[in-house]
Amino acid sequence: MFSEFALHERLLKAVAELKFVEPTPVQAAAIPLALQGRDLRVTAQTGSGKTAAFVLPILNRLIGPAKIRVSIKTLILLPTRELAQQTLKEVERFSQFTFIKSGLITGGEDFKVQAAMLRKVPDILIGTPGRMIEQLNAGNLDLKEVEVLVLDEADRMLDMGFAEDVQRLVDECTNRQQTMLFSATTGGSGLREMVAKVLNNPEHLQLNAVSQLNETTRQQIITADHNQHKEQIVNWLLANETYQKAIVFTNTRAMADRIYGRLVAQEYKAFVLHGDKDQKDRKLAIDRLKQGGVKILVATDVAARGLDVDGLDLVINFDMPRSGDEYVHRIGRTGRAGNDGLAISLICHGDWNLMSSIERYLKQSFERRTIKEVKGTYGGPKKVKASGKAVGVKKKKTDAKGDKKKVAAKTPTKRKSANRPKAEAPSLVSKDGMAPLKRRKPQEPAAE
Ligand code: AMP
């Protein structure tokens, strides 16, 4: 029960108003420690209720009588606009019975309007790193009195290339007393470095081991011969699966547009979201999806980041995400708040090893599914290694002397290249064969 936390009654009233009854595991673990002022490093997936886990303790700290605001007391950084907007909404919902004011700074919004908002000094400032830096450089932003700093989806901010910006903003918060860092995954060396630099003797709460992600979401793969075949499978799934709302992920904008075009031609209520779309389109897509006017969203990763839409219960990976972390982020769109979800990845010959790396990374085995109406000829590799990868990768040849010779990189034969559709994602696999390579630089510009 939320009433067991030492939260101000006005916050408990808001919690009750929102009909939150039981705290989620991340809330149960993080709220008491955050209320004590501890630095936290929390690994929890999107949809776990992590926003309330840091927002409620922050509000509890700030709550008090109405007074003139002279400095920003809390800074919350997130990787994308949508996520920042959603966090602002969550903060406003929880602070509805208080005098606490929040502001939002993201790309794609009017710079001067933001500067005017900053002059009024919000208690809590929420936003994305790129635009924050611009406001800082313009002399509009003073973070010296920030007491609490939150880095939400920190792993993702690093993946999107915001490490330097985030560090600069952290350095601006010279008087901070508490820092909380949230990530959906345990992250790599970049995240470890950030944790070491930014957090002070943190408590590490690991709410979801990677392998336990999305217990409520079934994860399936369907093999496909090529992209046109994948399109047929998508059509079949959208026509025959039971779902409220679906999202189809592609790795490129061009493919997202292509699939969207095909769906619209079939009179599906669909929307496309990718880095080429402006803020207005993005808002419209998300609003329509939330209101139910649109049932299907076709999106690239960056564009779909931070979506929190009720009833999203079908995720189709037209292209396999390029890393295990990205997979986790995509699948985090479904199966939220205990609802069942279904995630289906379409796997061509060229996707197989990436898929099996992701299985190993997640310590899960995806369910193999065949749909007889759209069954192709490719059904996975004939032989797989213990790692799950396809046998048949070229080996180094040994010459007569027994020395290992490098096999010169040959141009692939016509037959082989004909088998592999151009637009397929390359197999990015780490040297140790355990985890897929992490993408350092996004393929499309950050969604700001
Ligand atoms: P988040 O992981 O913070 O994005 O939260 C995911 C969704 O779960 C949001 O729509 C929240 O409003 C909702 N939520 C968070 N905590 C609870 C709770 N204790 N009970 C019911 N819903 C919740």
Image: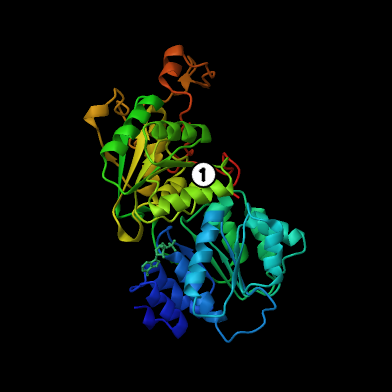
Q: Residue 249, percent across and down?
A: 43, 40
Q: Residue at x 62, y 74 (%)?
A: 123
Residue 448, relative to residue 103: is it above or below? above
Residue linked to disc 1: 438
| Relative horizontal placement of residue 5, taking residue 183 as reference (left or right) | left
Q: Residue 157, percent across and down?
A: 57, 54
Q: Residue at x 67, y 79 (%)?
A: 69
The tally of labels here is 1
SS class, disc 1: loop
Would residue 113 be seen by someone viewing this image from the given angle?
A: yes
Would residue 168 be seen by someone viewing this image from the given angle?
A: no
Quadrant in the picture for residue 119: bottom right
Render colour scheme: rainbow
- Circle 1 residues within 10 Å: few <14, some 14–19, many ≥20: some
- Residue extending furthest bottom? 65
* Placement of the N terminus among the 4 image quadrants: bottom left
Q: Residue 427, percent across and down?
A: 46, 33
Q: Nearer the viewer, residue 412 or 383?
A: 412
Q: Residue at x 70, y 78 (%)?
A: 70
| Relative horizontal placement of residue 89, taking residue 237 as reference (left or right) | right
Q: Nearer the viewer, residue 328 or 193?
A: 328
| Relative horizontal placement of residue 368, taking residue 434 as reference (left or right) | left
Residue type (three-letter) at the residue carrying disc 1? Lys
| Relative horizontal placement of residue 227, taking residue 67 as reference (left or right) | left
Q: Residue 326, percent across and down?
A: 46, 46
User: Where ligand 1 lies, by image quadrant?
Assistant: bottom left
Q: Is mark 1 within 8 Å of ligand 1?
A: no
